């Protein structure tokens, strides 16, 4: 449902070569002339020329404050900004009125969390639909549920919401093989009649685990059964999968975020999508210009969403760049992108399986993973592994990847992660494995 067509063909070598030619940075060398092998797309993706050109053209030809001036440049800037919103809406399979531009995915999640805590303020929910108002009110005795595999961006805001409101944070655990512990008996203890929010990642940024978020999946169905709002962090899935099923009318998902810089777009722009009724009921996170309807000295009223959540001059050039990046992914075909990712994933797991001194984290089946492979070399710190790879021109991520609790659950201080993009090649995975073979040589391990 959210993993693309099972019969989609992976990208051919020629297709990937053509794609790579669109990404200027991939042609550079590092560390004394070594070809760059970029396997850190889970942290941030590289940008194709169409994205760079879209931003540059906006600044060179249309730059003006959006939704303000009546002159031609302001009109052009506003049209470009709203066209970008329409592109994002198309990418998500939804309506532009449900798309809020944010600084990044983290801000989108904070916007949601603060809306819940702001809902308790006197008058904050005046005029809101009673059902949405009830669901937005969080206080002592209520509970918020996350999972043990969350990025800090989908954990800390909910911790803070509970601290501010007196609600209790609970979480779904992770099994030893990197899956959610969603057994019915266990889940019934975590998601209860007191649960107001269930926030979880679509794809783990560490383990690559693809969580089942279909309407009848155990977690989503349990949340729906008690009337809890379901919030999805799609930052790791949006660059690899067709996620339109998550925004469908009957999906069971109420809000979703993703970030531009991981989906071939610029830094400084992200997206919050939410149900129209939720957006209409939510109190704003930021206030000021552009998000207002009427302002008097005695008080103000808010513009309808999405403007209600976009105070100040927006990131117009970045939104235009993001639209170009999403168009690029759409043109390649997200089913093909996913098939390519699965090919890379299978090849990587096969190569690491041939190296008994490497321990891969997360689910074993390739189809249960998306985008990333984290691993450890027992007896060697992940930072040292990363340094060895970097010396060979291979860029990976080391550390806890903003997922400290998950690493504690796995009884690890850190891990090394290789992650893929639409431009990653099988040859780069081979180069990664070859560079990794230097680790036992350098550290005197039995290879």
Image (tube, grey):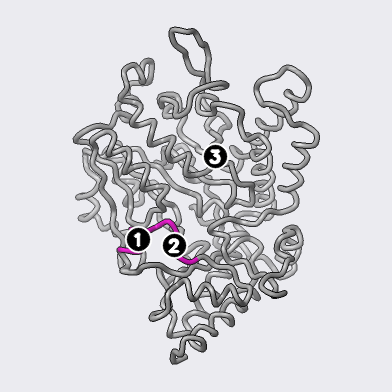
Residue 368 in sight: no
The image position of residue 194, as x and y in percent, is: 22, 38
Q: Residue at x 49, y 8 (%)?
A: 296
Task: Calculate the distance from the C-alpha at mark 1 to the C-alpha at mark 3.
Answer: 26 Å
Residue contact at pointers 1 and 2, CB within 8 angstroms: yes
Cα gap from disc 1 to disc 2, whole angstroms:
9 Å
Q: Classify residue 156 as left or right of residue 13.
A: left
Q: Pinpoint residue 152: horizontal percent, then vertical percent.
A: 40, 51
Counting residues from the start of the chain, the first of labels 1 and 2 encountered is: 2
Q: Residues within 10 Å of mark 3 (few under 14, many from 20)?
A: some
Magenta-tinted stretch: 398-408
What is the CA distance from the residue labelled 3 to the residue labelled 2? 23 Å
Question: Residue visible at 62% across and 66% down?
Answer: 38
The residue most toward the front is 32
Q: Which residue is mark 1?
A: 406
Picture residue at 51% right of the left edge, 11% below the top: 295
Residues 31 and 103: in front is 31
- Nearer the N terminus, badge 3 or badge 2? 3
Q: Is residue 54 magenta?
A: no
Task: Give the secondary structure at mark 3.
Answer: loop
Question: Which mark, by number, is residue 103?
Answer: 3
Vertical arrangement, residue 311 with respect to residue 404, above or below: above
Residue 206, numbered circle: 2
- Dot 2 crowding, Cα within 10 Å, few <14, some 14–19, many 20+: many
* Residue 23 appears left or right of 384: right
């Amino acid at each position: 449902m959210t993993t693309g067509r099972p019969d989609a063909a992976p990208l051919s070598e020629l297709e990937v070569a053509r794609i790579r030619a669109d990404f200027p940075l991939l042609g550079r060398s590092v560390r004394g002339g070594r070809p760059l092998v970029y396997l850190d797309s889970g942290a941030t993706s590289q940008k194709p020329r169409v994205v760079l050109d879209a931003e540059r053209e906006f600044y060179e030809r249309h730059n003006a404050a959006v939704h303000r001036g009546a002159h031609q440049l302001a009109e052009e800037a506003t049209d470009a900004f709203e066209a970008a919103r329409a592109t994002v809406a198309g990418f998500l399979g939804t309506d532009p009125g449900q798309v809020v531009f944010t600084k990044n995915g983290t801000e989108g999640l904070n916007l949601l969390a603060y809306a819940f805590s702001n809902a308790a303020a006197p008058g904050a929910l005046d005029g809101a639909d009673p059902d949405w108002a009830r669901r937005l009110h969080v206080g002592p005795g209520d509970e918020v549920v996350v999972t043990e595999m969350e990025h800090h961006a989908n954990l800390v805001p909910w911790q803070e919401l509970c601290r501010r409101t007196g609600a209790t944070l609970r979480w779904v655990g992770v099994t030893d093989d990197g899956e959610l512990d969603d057994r019915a008996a266990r889940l019934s203890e975590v998601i209860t009649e007191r649960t107001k929010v269930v926030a979880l990642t679509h794809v783990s940024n560490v383990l690559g685990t693809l969580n089942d978020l279909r309407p009848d999946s155990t977690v989503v169905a349990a949340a729906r059964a008690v009337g809890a709002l379901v919030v999805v962090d799609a930052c790791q899935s949006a660059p690899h999968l067709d996620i339109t099923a998550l925004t469908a009318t009957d999906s069971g998902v109420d809000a979703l975020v993703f970030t531009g810089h991981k989906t071939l777009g610029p830094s400084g722009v992200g997206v919050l999508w939410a149900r129209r009724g939720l957006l209409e009921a939510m109190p704003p996170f930021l206030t000021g210009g552009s998000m207002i309807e009427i302002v008097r000295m005695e008080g103000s009223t808010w513009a309808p969403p999405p403007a209600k959540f976009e105070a100040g001059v927006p990131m117009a050039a970045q939104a235009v760049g993001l639209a170009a990046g999403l168009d690029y992914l759409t043109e390649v075909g997200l089913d093909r992108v996913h098939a390519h990712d699965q090919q890379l994933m299978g090849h990587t797991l096969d190569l690491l399986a041939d190296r008994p001194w490497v321990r891969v984290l997360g689910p074993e089946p390739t189809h249960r993973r998306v985008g990333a492979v984290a691993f450890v070399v027992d007896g060697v710190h992940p930072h040292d592994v990363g340094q060895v790879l970097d010396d060979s021109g291979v860029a990976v991520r080391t550390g806890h990847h903003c997922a400290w609790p998950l690493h504690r659950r796995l009884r690890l201080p850190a891990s090394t992660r290789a992650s893929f993009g639409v431009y990653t090649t099988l040859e780069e995975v081979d180069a990664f494995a070859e560079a990794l073979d230097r680790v036992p040589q350098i550290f005197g391990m039995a290879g």
